[in-house]
Image: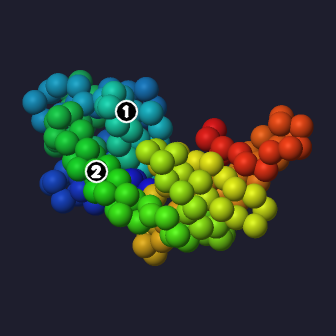
Amino acid sequence: MKFSKMAITAIAAAGIATAAYAQGVTAGATVYGPEGNAVGTIESVADGVVTVDTGKHKAPLPANAFGEGEQGPTITVTKAQLNAMLDEQVAAANAKRDAALIETATVVTADNQPLGIVESIEGDNVIVARSEGDVNLLREHFAVNQNGQLMALFTAAQIDEAVAAQTAAAGGSDSSAGASQ
């Protein structure tokens, strides 16, 4: 799921100031909200995206969303508001995933390679049938990609490695493997 793009869009829509890149926006710094309360800790800064760990979510925010306050970097939303925005995004993404995750659905990998067809779903356990052997995944291992396709959150190589490791551990007798890592 592309939470980073969704979060950046939601934060921009919420009115976070587009201030110049504030000093102190570095990994480990505490981020403060409009009332001076801590929102979270900066986990990383890369390619214009600052990931803030609120304790509940890792929120990707645009670097230009940060201002400079007396205590350190600031944003114009509170921790509760940021968590609520991300909760809504996660719920919407999960609803899309659950609507697409049906038996006979075609599945692609995170690197857009064909994976197989959903053979069965029992609770959170999903079996994807593929010519090389079935793959057991969890519901949380799926999303809907930007093209609206059901996607496993693993690359084809990661799935092949997990299947090979599982087959080797089972002594070569089991072609079914979980890709949970």
Task: Name the residue located 32 percent from the left edge and 31 percent from the top edge.
Answer: 56
Left or right? Give the position of 4 relative to 105.
left
Tell me the kind of residue under disc 2: Ala
Residue pointed to by mark 2: 91
Q: Nearer the viewer, residue 13 or 88?
A: 88
Tell me the kind of residue under disc 1: Asp
Camera-side mark, 1 or 2:
2
Mark 1 or mark 2, earlier in chain: 1
Q: Nearer the viewer, residue 58 or 100?
A: 100
Left or right? Give the position of 25 relative to 174.
left
Q: What coloring was used for the rendering?
A: rainbow
Dot 2, crowdedness within 10 Å: few (<14), some or many (≥20)?
A: few
Residue pointed to by mark 1: 53
Task: Name the residue located 40 percent from the left edge and 53 percent from the top edge.
Answer: 4
Up-down relation of residue 18 to residue 169 (above or below): below
Dot 1, crowdedness within 10 Å: few (<14), some or many (≥20)?
A: some
Whole-number angstrom distance, CA of label 1 to CA of label 2: 19 Å
Image position, residue 87 (x, y; %): 26, 44
Query: Under tag 2, what secondary structure?
Result: helix
Q: Are marks 1 and 2 in contact (CB under 8 Å)?
A: no
Image position, residue 127 (x, y; %): 59, 54
Task: Name the residue located 89 percent from the left edge and 37 percent from the top edge.
Answer: 171
Image position, residue 109 (x, y; %): 61, 62
Task: Name the residue located 14 percent from the left edge and 27 percent from the top edge.
Answer: 36
Image position, residue 172 (x, y; %): 89, 43
Q: Which mark is residue 84?
A: none
